[in-house]
Image (tube, helix red, strand yellow):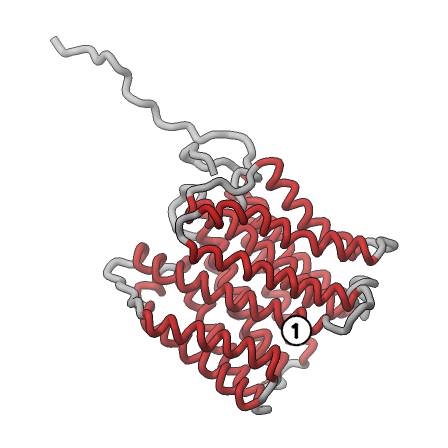
Amino acid sequence: MGSIPLVEPPATPIPPKGWTPFALGFRPFFVLAGLSGALLMILWMVFRHMNLTASAYFGSSEWHSHEMLFGFTVAIIAGFLLTAVRNWTGMDTPTGRPLALLALLWLAGRLLPLIPAIPDWLIAIVDLSFIPALIFALYSPLMKGVNHVNRLFLPLLGGMALANLLYHLQGLGFTSTGRQGIELMLNLILLLLIVVGGRVLPFFTEKAVSGAEPRFSKRREQWVYITIILWILSELLLSEAWLMFVASLSVAITQFWRFIDWHHPGVWQRPILWVLFTGLGWLIIGFLLKALAVMGAFPHNLSTHALTAGAIGVFAMGMMARVSLGHTGRELQVSRMMTFGFVLINLAVAVRVFLPLTEILTYQACVWLSGSLWVVCYLAFCLSYFPILIRPRPDGRPG
């Protein structure tokens, strides 16, 4: 006679139901980044086309620069750090109601400048409050964590808060430091990208590509940080053309050195990886174009967009896609729609940076075409990832 099992076999796990938009930091902030990536660009193109001022406080072009850096990009930084710091330290970062309040503070900073009759001082205070609030949220786990190198993110965020203060001091009429605030913020974001890229790109490649062995070089990494610091100092403080040329060219060379040491042909079989490598590629191209721009051989505005829309925009898109899948327990494979979005965002950058040089289209038409491609890409992200970001993990684990 066959034996009767005393224990029933485990049932197939039933995916949990409900909504968890505030279960971990990446969830609300990647939702906000996806929406703002599309909506901020749409609004800016409409305002530009109709020759309207986006905000009485900011102005039109200033609003675009500020919101893409201190709004859109900071949302991605917040989502990434609130998630990564918990992994690095093993300590909790805000979830639930505190996380919701933090996200609401970010959102208020985006909406208030668009509402007529809001006092300038209130716009400034609300927007200036977000980065210090983020520092407060991350301070305890970073300071208590055993890896002291992670504490680097606190002064980096402090520098970003200072950059925003420089910008708002001009908005309030006290100084003329708005441009310095934008330049400082851009360079600090690039520094953050270089720091994070150095951590995640070789790691992701080794884990995802069979046979990949990204090379680590202490000497290379020393030169990476020496050159980017030299660039930041030369642009913000010294403004010597020859020094800026040497610094920007050196940054491009050290980033290309990274690219060669980390690259494996298998990367191009995985969209979740090649989008990050194309972001690194735009970082290299952007600093090469900066070197040419310093010598008067390339338009400054276009070289800047190779770094903003290119290096930051493309790398940020790849990071949001990778982090969202990894931290919701899903297979690290993107949909065809998202792969198409990765292609479009790189095309948008190429159109923005290089097409105006050909005179095939007017400059305005290039801006419109590039902006439209960017919007489609971020709408693809919203459609692909919002269900992932607001629903529980399929495996039922927290986060």
Instruction: Residue 286: give x, y in percent of width and height.
Output: 52, 77
- The residue singled out by tag 1 in the image is 367
Question: Residue 52: in sight, yes or no?
Answer: no
* 26, 138: nearer the viewer: 138
Secondary structure beneath disc 1?
helix
Instruction: Residue 5: give x, y in percent of width and height.
Output: 21, 13
| Amino acid of disc 1 | Val
**Left of 324 or right of it: where is 376?**
right
Name the residue: 30% across, 58% down: 206
Name the residue: 55% across, 41% down: 94
Instruction: Residue 200: give x, y in percent of width and height.
Output: 40, 59
Q: Residue furthest top?
A: 1
Residue 162 in which image quadrant? bottom right
| Relative to 227, residue 9 above or below | above
Name the residue: 61% across, 77% down: 236
| Relative to 27, residue 247 above or below | below
Q: Residue furthest left?
A: 1
Q: Residue furthest right?
A: 117
Residue 240 in which image quadrant? bottom right
